Each structure stands twice: as C-alpha cells, then as structure tokens.
Amino acid sequence: MTSVALAAQNGVNSALAGAAALVACAFALSTADRWLRRGQPHERAWTVAMALFSIGSFALWWAESAGWSRGVFRLFFLAGAVLNVAWLALGTIYLLVGRRVGDIVQTSLVALSGLATGIVLIAPMKTEIVADQFPTGKEVFGVAPRILAAVGSGVPALVIILGALWSTWRVLAKKTPSLNSANARQVVSPGRLAVGNVLIATGTIVLSLSGTLAGRLGKDRAFAVTLLAGVVVLFAGFLVASNSTRRASVQRAAQYLAGATSR
C-alpha cells in the first residue's frame, strides 16, 4: 500500500473514530443531564459508561491520527475493551432489578474497575507497539488483561441484550418491564419502549462485531465502523426509550396533583 493510500485510509478511520467519540460525548452529556435532574442511578451508570466509551473512541482517533503508542493502546484497551460495557450493563440491572441489587453490583464494579485499571496499566507487553499498525490484546498482553476484556465485555453484553429483549417481551405482553415490583415503572408508550429496547440490543450486538468485520475491512476500519455504528444505535435506543416509562410513584403524584387542581 502506498503512503498516499495509507494516509487516506488512516484519515477515514480517524474521522470515523472521532465521530464515534463525539456521539458518545453527546450521549454522556444527555444522560448526565437527566441524572442531575432526576437522580436515577441507571442514568448515572450510563453516564460513566458513555464517558468511558468517549475515552476509548478518542484514544482510537488519536492513534489513527498520530500513531499508536503504549500509553494510547493501554487507554484504548482499558476504556473500550474492559470497562465501558460493564458500566452500561449496570444501568440495565438498575432498571430491571432495582436500586438495592444495583447498589451491591455497583460497589463490586467500582472495586473490580480499580483492579482492572491497575492490571491493564502495569501489565507487561509482549511486543513493541508499531505506530502505524493496529495492535490487539492477543498480540500485546498476557493472559490476565485478555481475560478481563473477555469477561468485562462478554458477560455484560449478554446482560444488556437479554435484558433488553426480556423487557421488550414484557412490554408487548402488557406487563411491567421489571423483575421487582418495588421498581415498577409506568409504561407511557409500549411500542416506543419496545423499539428502544430492540435498538439497545442491536447496538450492543454491533459493538461486538469488530472481530467479524476485521477480515473484510481490516482491524482499524472494523473497530472504527463498529464503534460509530454501535454508539449511534445505542443513542437512538436511549432517546426512543427514555421517555417511554416513568416510575409508579411519579405516576401517582401526577394523578394526585391533577385531582387536586380539578377540585
């Protein structure tokens, strides 16, 4: 590949990664605004997840623009492959199971995130990082960081996908999309909530397709494409589903106020 063609390819990859980072930042700001206004723990978890997603995407953008280095790859691997999906799944747990279980999982996740950060940042690298070649965890790291990435991405992704599909089924069956009656939510628009959940499951699946697409698009392009497509679909799912439910206590308060004003 000529230097001109390589520069053009890196430019496209850089643009895709940068766009993914900007969408993730918009997603994080949106969930942070809702969390600050409403204080819901699932929105706090999503804010952390999208902040991590932004960091991973910006690391990829930097690598495609200025070249890979040890520090950039560690940051990309930690934020993008190990931590962000787990925090996204925490939001699903809060929504489906409730605050009590969610708080327990969050405490464990904070401790595990600290442990994972330490391991990834100090883990020895088996090979040198070449500035213009996309490195992979298998090529660079030993067993421990790779296990963290497999468990930290695979298990939480399954929680998100199954949770979204289960919630969709509950909504279509005209039941509350929650495992805990104390965490019951009033569904304002069942169809919109179902579509939002399907989009969230689809976005999570898209994010896991980089390995499948790598053979066709190359590792750099596959990661950039799946990052952008995945976060766009996730954001769309969030926007569609976010105003489709409200907590039962909010519904009762609204009914009380409506009755009071009509007297």
Image: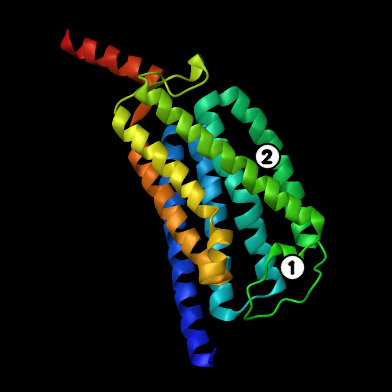
Tell me where residue 251 appears, x and y as whole percent: 33, 19
Image coordinates of residue 54 in percent, x first then y, are 52, 58
- Which residue in the protein does label 1 denote? 139
State the residue at coordinates (33%, 40%): 240
Which residue, as the protein is rendered here, is positioned at the far left?
262
Horizontal relation, residue 200 to residue 66: left or right: left
Image location (x, y in percent) of residue 144: 80, 53
State the separation of the CA atoms marked 2 and 1. 27 Å
Q: Nearer the viewer, residue 33 or 248?
A: 248
* Image quadrant where one finds the C terminus: top left
* Element class at badge 2: helix
Spot the residue most to the top: 263
In the picture of the structure, the residue carrying the numbered disc 2 is 109
What type is the residue that disc 1 sits on? Glu
For the residue marked with disc 2, what is the amino acid?
Answer: Leu
Q: Residue at x 41, y 30 (%)?
A: 168
The total of numbered circles placed on residues is 2
Q: Foreground mark, 2 or 1?
A: 1
Depth check, front residue: 261 or 250 = 250
Residue 18 shows up from this direction = yes
Tag 2–tag 1 contact (CB < 8 Å): no
